[in-house]
Image (cartoon, rainbow, N blue to C red):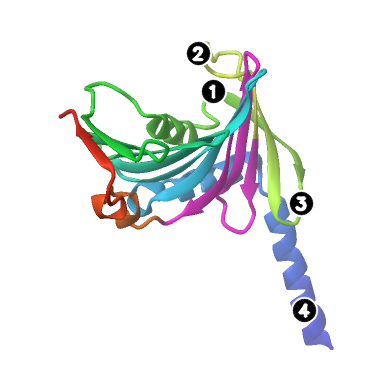
Amino acid sequence: MKRFFTLLLTALLASTALSAQTPEEIIARMDRETDRFDAEGFSMVMEIRLPILGAFATTVYTRGDKYKMVTTVKDETVINWSDGVTDWQYEPSKNEVTIEPRKAGTTSDAESNKKMIDSVTQGYDVRLKGQTDEVWQFRCTKSRDNTDKDDPKNMDLVVSKSTYLPVSIKASMHGVTVTLRDFTLGIDEKDITFDPAQYPGAKITDKR
């Protein structure tokens, strides 16, 4: 019985230590986990909600310099690939693939989103506003010394307690709400590489 209570006390102390983590410690651990995104690849859903036009979602798969993006707006779907040198775009409604060289100095939506994840709390004051058994919920408020006009005033960040990966990042600005969600670590490079064999009969327009 004494051994039982000793084990119980150990478990309670471990639980208390976990719950006592500061927001800074949790975010630092999240940053270490997302540092694996480049080498192992990751996927996420980017949802954009616009006034009047409503919402549309893009699923992003990326690893290193390569990415694949599947965007659906109403009934139309477009698939984009890039390896950092060449861009491919497939429009199912036209059954057409357009190939173009990557324009120098351009930044893709996938790259912009990854940058946002890499520095999600930079320039923000972070506080824990709630938690469940599965996640921590943070409110990120723009710091007074953050003069970047493109940064939203507030962001809501949810972090998984089991993986320390972000569960969702939500921000609104000028009536537009952007939510990054459904993060998954680990993408096979072949799954984000354009393969013409998967689109037999498609018209190929090569602009290189």
Of tags 1 and 2, which is closer to the observer?
2
Image position of 198 (left or right of 85): right
Question: Which of the two residues, 150 or 82, is positioned nearer the viewer here?
Answer: 82
The residue tagged 2 is 148
Residue 83 visible: no
Of tags 4 and 2, which is closer to the observer?
2
Q: Are marks 4 and 1 in contact (CB under 8 Å)?
A: no
Residue type at mark 3 is Thr
Main SS, magenta residues: strand
Quadrant for the C terminus in the image: top left
Image position of 122 (left or right of 132): left
The quadrant where residue 124 appears:
top right
Question: Which of the two residues, 87 or 110, is positioned nearer the viewer here?
Answer: 87
Q: Are marks 4 and 2 in contact (CB under 8 Å)?
A: no
Residues at marks 4 and 2, CA–CA distance in whole angstroms: 53 Å
Residues at marks 3 and 2, CA–CA distance in whole angstroms: 33 Å
- Label disc, if present, on residue 123 of the rendered structure: 1
Residue 183 falls within the magenta-colored stretch:
yes
- Give x and y (percent) for residue 159: 62, 46
Q: Is residue 137 above or below residue 113?
A: below
Question: Which of the two residues, 16 or 99, is positioned nearer the viewer here?
Answer: 99
The residue tagged 3 is 132
Residue type at mark 4 is Thr
Query: In this picture, which residue range is highlighted in magenta?
Result: 157-186
The residue tagged 4 is 6
Task: Tell which residue pokes out farthest to the left in this image.
Answer: 208
Residue type at mark 2 is Asp
Image position of 203 (left or right of 186): left
Q: Secondary structure at mark 3?
A: loop
Mark closer to the chain start, 1 or 2: 1
